[in-house]
Amino acid sequence: MDKFLIAVKNDINSSLKDIPEKYFDFKKNFIDPLGKATRTRFAYHIADALAIDTDKIIKIASSAELIHLASLLHDDCVDDGVKRRGNPTINFTFGLNMAILVGDFTAAIAFRKANSISSDISFSLADCVEDMSKGALLEENSRYKIISSDIYSEVISLKTTPLFKWIATSCGLISGGSFSRELERISDSFGMSFQIIDDILDISGDENSIGKDTFKDILEGKINYPVLLSLDDDYVRKRIEGFFNDRADLTSLYELKKYIIENGYIEKARDRALKLIEEVETDVHKLPNKKAAVELYNFMYSMTEREK
Ligand code: FPP
Ligand code: MG
């Protein structure tokens, strides 16, 4: 795995290092290209479980990480994020315009990389980014609204899941096209589970460990998963409706955070994230490399226990 992570990082850095400084100085203005490298690790385990040589999917992982990076650069503009991967965001340091344009740039590099594998793979990456954008738009249109669990699921299955699905189905194509149903189910479940944990960390995570600000979602008018679960509770619903109406009473919001943690909604959300992984255990064990399938399952399971 370490060799694979280094190869992906080198592949990304080699695409960014020759960009003339007059556009953006990637060498000086450090952008961590991998972060936790979740998409790279997922790609590695999927390829290994499909019994493909992981050298063949370096460009799949690096294209996915570059699209993820582009989406975070844009997401931080949308969310007014100030910290990402432990560093000040590009929008915070250089302003919105620069962050949007650097995001456009990294997305273009990702498409070129994907196209160097095959036109089918770059075409499906375009579908993936279309879905991610739809998810981000649906989330934007739902801000400061009490959303249903159906809308929550639709947002996540558009904004977060498609990139995992693109990785898995692209690896599937390289391995000869078998197991497409299993790969879709595995990535759907993993994407949803991954986002639920991201939502949990927004409420109960430690800012230094996760490298970004916490308790941002509700302040930005977004109902995340633990909050969604707690909406049946009148105490929570009234406070959220109150805040969404006047966007003023932050004290009551911080009391709410404590209430959500103390009333077990974090554990309930984590249980759902675990269940989503357990639901695809049979699919994972249908993949041909049995030892690597166990490792894939353990990786997905361990992501539900992460603290960052
Ligand atoms: C982070 O989610 C953001 C995403 C998962 C995707 C956002 C998608 C776009 C901005 C559209 C795609 C655009 C391009 C250029 C590929 P989050 O806000 O829940 O996570 P956070 O807490 O880390 O900010
Ligand atoms: Mg965000």
Image (cartoon, rainbow, N blue to C red):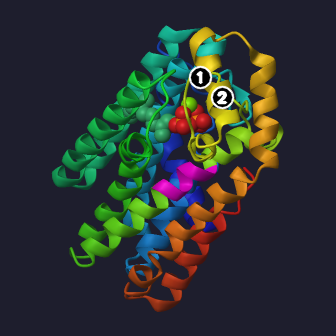
Point out residue 35 in the picture as x, y percentages from the top left corner.
63, 45
Q: Give the quarter of the image for residue 84.
A: top right
Instruction: State which region is magenta.
Output: 192-197
Point out residue 157 in the picture as x, y percentages from the top left corner.
38, 48
Left or right of residue 61, residue 37 in this image: right
Q: Amino acid at mark 2?
A: Phe
Q: Is residue 236 visible?
A: yes
Q: Amino acid at mark 1?
A: Glu
Q: Which residue is mark 2?
A: 30
Helix, strand, or loop for circle 1? Answer: helix
Helix, strand, or loop for circle 2? Answer: loop
Find out whether residue 63 is within the magenta segment. Answer: no
Q: Which residue is mark 1?
A: 241
Of callouts 2 and 1, which one flags the residue occurring earlier in the amino acid sequence?
A: 2
Residue sitting at 74 percent across and 13 percent down?
249
Residue sitting at 76 percent across and 32 percent down?
256
Residue 288 vertical position relative to residue 264 in the rendered view, above or below = below
Residue sitting at 64 percent across and 18 percent down?
242
Label 2 environment density (alpha carbons within 10 Å; few <14, some 14–19, many ≥20): few
- Main secondary structure found in the magenta portion: helix
Q: Nearer the viewer, residue 166 or 244?
A: 244
Q: Is residue 207 visible?
A: no
